[in-house]
Image: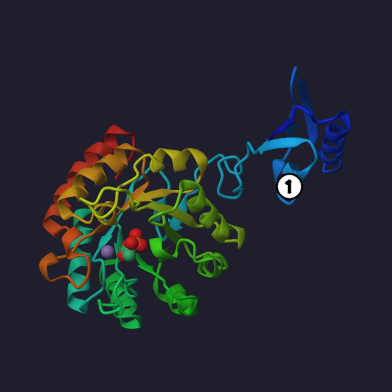
Amino acid sequence: MIIVFKPQATEEDIDHVTDRLRELGLKSQISQGEERTIIGVIGDERLLDNQPLSVFPGVESVTPIMAPWKLVSREFQKQNTVIDIGNIQIGGNRIVVMAGPCAVEKLEITVGIAKEVKAAGGCILRGGAYKPRTSPYSFQGLGREGLDFLAEAKKQTGLPVVSEILDPRDTDIFLEKADIIQIGARNMQNFELLKEVGAYDKPVLLKRGMSATVKEFLLSAEYIMSRGNRNVMLCERGIRTFETHYRNTLDLSAVPALKEMSHLPVIVDPSHATGKWNLVAPLAKAAIAAGADGLLIEVHSNPECALCDGEESIKPKRFKELMIDLKKIAEAVGRDL
Ligand code: PEP
Ligand code: MN
């Protein structure tokens, strides 16, 4: 932290700050310029979380050097977090591809897509049972029955499942039926829901809010981790910009930035990022090249008739071709797929 004093600050003002820092167990490195005095604070700046130094007399500005998040930071943990889902590891050398329909529809459709996903090399089945729809008149998902269909698809294929929770009152059923609990973009700052999933060790896939900064995203992950759950993965799914040609703008810069700032696995969702099936493959490839640890892709056997997000869903055949291309890119960046 850097504390800059006003030109008219007195020696007493400066002593007042250094005394307080000393009381807190921090050291001050004072730089006496011609016009101003600057203090570099040495030590664990987290000790200053509840100490607003900017209100001290004579202080002009306070610039924190350490990030406001702790448990999610690289400073806290140097090595990458690797999350075990059965025999699949997320955050390791192998890139993990999660795929499936936006919404779980009929049992046969779900099982059929799961089989295709598995045959193409996908290793986790995605499917929404509770859908956060913009319009209350749109298909809201099958609810519990949807989770049962996913469980049946898992039974038949062995693929673990990821599904989105909307309501903390459904936690028990998600703990029982899902292998990864998804917190969607719309709930990234639903702090009660974050605290709820933080209370268990069930892996959580946290999606970036559509208008959230990287900093806010990491602080939401911190909410989950601060409750004890260390199994958190971050998912970049596009943000809102002035561009309206596609649904969102994939913030690819977030991938290396998040990897630098945090030890948590980073997943990219090119489907919601673009809202267009024809843009999914190029962005999936770019995501892997940029260092993503995994992908979340919407796959549907009949996108024309899908009850949700058919326009961004790719067919199993295209998914299979994409997996072949992704393997080459993964190898080029020293990863397996
Ligand atoms: C989803 O993955 O089904 C979904 C609704 O995504 P997002 O929260 O990113 O919009
Ligand atoms: Mn969708």
Is 245 positioned to the left or the right of 334 in the image? left
Crowd tier of the residue under label 1, counting other residues whose Cα lies within 10 Å: few below 14, some 14–19, many 20 or above: few
Which quarter of the figure is the C terminus placed in? Answer: top left
Is 10 positioned to the left or the right of 166 in the image? right
Give the image location of residue 109, x and y in percent.
17, 73
Residue sitting at 73 percent across and 52 percent down? 50
Residue sitting at 54 percent across and 65 percent down? 191
Quadrant in which ligand 2 is drawn: bottom left
Question: In this orientation, which residue lies closer to the viewer: 29 or 271?
Answer: 29
Please name the amino acid that badge 1 sits on.
Pro
* Number of numbered discs overlaid on the protein picture: 1
Residue 320 in view:
yes
Residue sitting at 20 percent across and 61 percent down? 299
Farthest residue in the front direction? 8
Query: Is disc 1 placed on a helix, strand or loop?
Result: loop
Farthest residue in the bottom direction? 145
Image quarter of residue 333: top left
Question: In this orientation, which residue lies closer to the viewer: 64 or 154?
Answer: 64
Image quarter of residue 100: bottom left
Give the image location of residue 27, x and y in percent.
80, 33
Residue 184 in view:
no
Residue at image mark 1: 52
Farthest residue in the top direction? 34
Give the image location of residue 195, x and y in percent.
56, 66
